[in-house]
Image (spheres, helix red, strand yellow):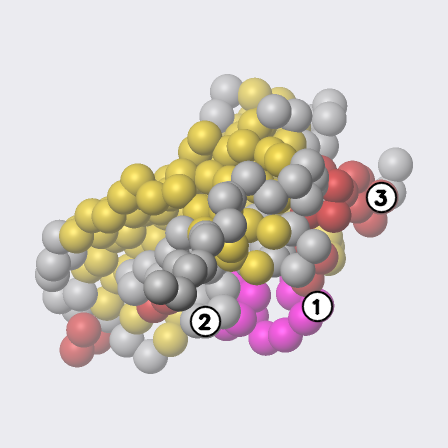
Amino acid sequence: MSIAADYARAVAALDSGHFPAYVSYDSRDWARGIDRESDGPQTVYVRTKDGAIVQGPPSEHRNPQIAVNDERGSNPISDPAFKARCYRAQSEESVQRNGRAALRFDLAPTCGPNDDYPFATLYADAQTLVPIEVDGTVSTEGVRVRLAQNFAQFNGYTLPSTLLVDVKGRGLLFWLREHAQLQYSDYKFYAANPVPRRQTAKPL
């Protein structure tokens, strides 16, 4: 098959259009560097037809936003860090990744500049082309950021399991070192809204 066709199969595995009407997941994050912070686990419910969060706080992870814009990475269902359809595969190569046969795709962004779409390499299972991991870097004046998104299978769906962000300063910011990790787990899928509607209080 062609490079474009192989990449299309990988993209299809991440297509949120085949999810049921609602998806929930647990999120946990922690960061270390100048400050040490941790948060979670928190359960978030997402309506897939429009990506709205119907219950649970949107993930406003300060440290990952150093690397990606404020619209990115807010939730792994409707606003994932890696938007596969905003890239094209320039080349592919058979490799070993974490002890398994894989295809490595070298990516180029198609929806905007590299700083907004920083992922450069996607690894997919050699047989199924289901994504395993995607990574990339963002370099700005004085700061270099490495991103790595891992994927796992949840009830037959391929979804993000972790997002790792490493920030290293350069030049006058040589002292800067930050590391953040977001974990997504316990995905559940629903045909109807699982969140009970709040009842309004009746007037006395």
Label number found at residue 199: none
The N terminus sits in image quarter = top right
- Of tags 1 and 2, which is closer to the observer? 2
Residue type, label 1: Thr
Q: What element carries label 2?
A: loop
**Residue nearest the observer in this picture, 171 or 58:** 58
Earlier along the polypeptide chain: callout 2 or callout 3?
3
Q: Is residue 120 magenta-colored?
A: yes
Q: Position of residue 172 (x, y in %)?
A: 17, 78
Task: Quote the CA–CA distance across marks 2 and 3.
Answer: 30 Å
Residue located beneath label 2 in the image: 69
Label number found at residue 110: 1
Q: What element carries label 1?
A: loop
Residue located beneath label 3 in the image: 5
Q: Where is residue 157 in the image (x, y as percent from the top left)?
A: 64, 32
> Magenta: predominant secondary structure element?
loop
Direction from residue 29 to residue 51 in the image, left or right: right
Earlier along the polypeptide chain: callout 3 or callout 1?
3
Residue type, label 2: Asn
Q: What residue appears at the point 75 percent right and 41 percent down from the top-left corner?
A: 18
Residue 93 shows in the view: no
Direction from residue 69 to residue 5 in the image, left or right: right
Q: Where is residue 13 in the image (x, y as percent from the top left)?
A: 71, 38
- Of tags 2 and 3, which is closer to the observer? 2
Magenta stretch bounds: 108-121
**Residue nearest the observer in this picture, 156 or 134:** 156
Task: Quote the CA–CA distance across marks 1 and 2.
Answer: 16 Å
Earlier along the polypeptide chain: callout 1 or callout 2?
2
